[in-house]
Amino acid sequence: MPIRLRKFIGTILIIVLVLVYALVANTIAVATLGNAPWWGHLLYFLLTGLLWVLPAMVIIKWMAGPRQR
C-alpha cells in the first residue's frame, strides 16, 4: 500500500477515534459522575484524557509502515 494512502487512512481513523472516544468518555462521565467529588472528576478526566493515546499510537505506527533497514 502506498505511504500516502496509508497516511490518509490513518488520519481519518485518528479523527474518528478521537470523536467517538470523546463522545463515549463524556457519556460515561455524565452517567456515573453525577454525585462524585471534585477529585473523582479530576481522576476520571485525567485518565480518559490520556488513554486515547494508546490506540492512536498503534494507528500512527501503522501509518509509518514497515521499518526500513
Image: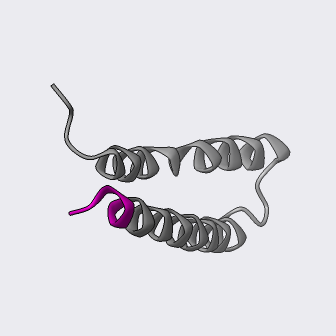
Q: Quadrant of residue 23?
A: bottom right
Q: Quadrant of the C terminus?
A: top left
Pinpoint residue 68: horizontal percent, then vertical percent: 20, 31
Q: Residue furthest top?
A: 69
Q: Residue furthest right?
A: 38
Q: Nearer the viewer, residue 49 or 5?
A: 5
In the visual, does 27 lie left or right of 69?
right
What residue lies at 76% left-to-right and 43% top-to-bottom?
42
What residue lies at 59% left-to-right and 50% top-to-bottom?
48
Q: Quadrant of the N terminus?
A: bottom left
Pinpoint residue 19: horizontal percent, then vertical percent: 60, 71
Pinpoint residue 28: horizontal percent, then vertical percent: 60, 69
In magenta segment, residue 2:
yes
Q: Quadrant of residue 66?
A: top left
Does residue 36 sit above or below 28 in this rendering? above
In the visual, does 55 lie left or right of 22?
left
What residue lies at 40% left-to-right and 48% top-to-bottom?
60
State how the image is colored: one colour
Which stretch appears magenta?
Answer: 1-6
Q: Main secondary structure of the magenta part?
A: helix
Q: Residue furthest left?
A: 69
Pinpoint residue 41: horizontal percent, then vertical percent: 76, 50
Q: Nearer the viewer, residue 13 or 55?
A: 13
In the visual, does 3 lie left or right of 44?
left
Does residue 59 sit above or below 33 in this rendering? above
In magenta segment, residue 30:
no
Tally of numbered discs: 0
Q: Nearer the viewer, residue 2 or 20?
A: 2
What residue lies at 50% left-to-right and 62% top-to-bottom?
14
